[in-house]
Image (spheres, rainbow, N blue to C red):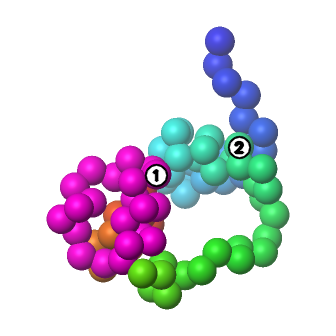
Amino acid sequence: MAKRVKNQEQYEALRDQGYSKEKSARIANTQNSGEKGGTAEKYEERTKEDLYEQAKKVGIEGRSKMTKKELIKALRNN
């Protein structure tokens, strides 16, 4: 049985932009999917340790050897 996407319109828009099915579904299924307001701190303003912890949460491999700049790139492309 396929899982249902909470915000189908956003899911389709993300797929059209080239996002993977998994990433599109993950974004479209967030609690505030489709709402504006991005209150998260910009990656460049976070510490390397914060970025490392975020990379750990999303399962980015090789994070322990990455520089801050590499962590930012990996997080943006995950």
User: Residue 41 falls in which quadrant of the image?
Assistant: bottom right
Question: In the image, residue 59 lies at what x, y percent?
Answer: 38, 47
Question: In the image, residue 65 lies at what x, y percent?
Answer: 18, 65
Residue furthest top as drawn: 1
* Secondary structure beneath label 2: loop
- In the foreground, 52 or 39: 52
Which residues fall within the magenta stretch?
48-68
Residues packed near mark 2 inside 10 Å, few (<14), some (14 to 19) or many (20 plus) = some
Q: Amino acid at mark 1?
A: Lys
Which residue does the image show at 28% across and 72% down from the upper left?
A: 70
- In the foreground, 34 or 48: 48
Is residue 22 left or right of 74 when viewed as pictured? right
Which residue does the image show at 22% across and 55% down from the upper left?
A: 62
Q: Is residue 23 magenta?
A: no
Residue 29, numbered circle: 2
Residue ID for mark 1? 57
The quadrant the C terminus occupies is bottom left
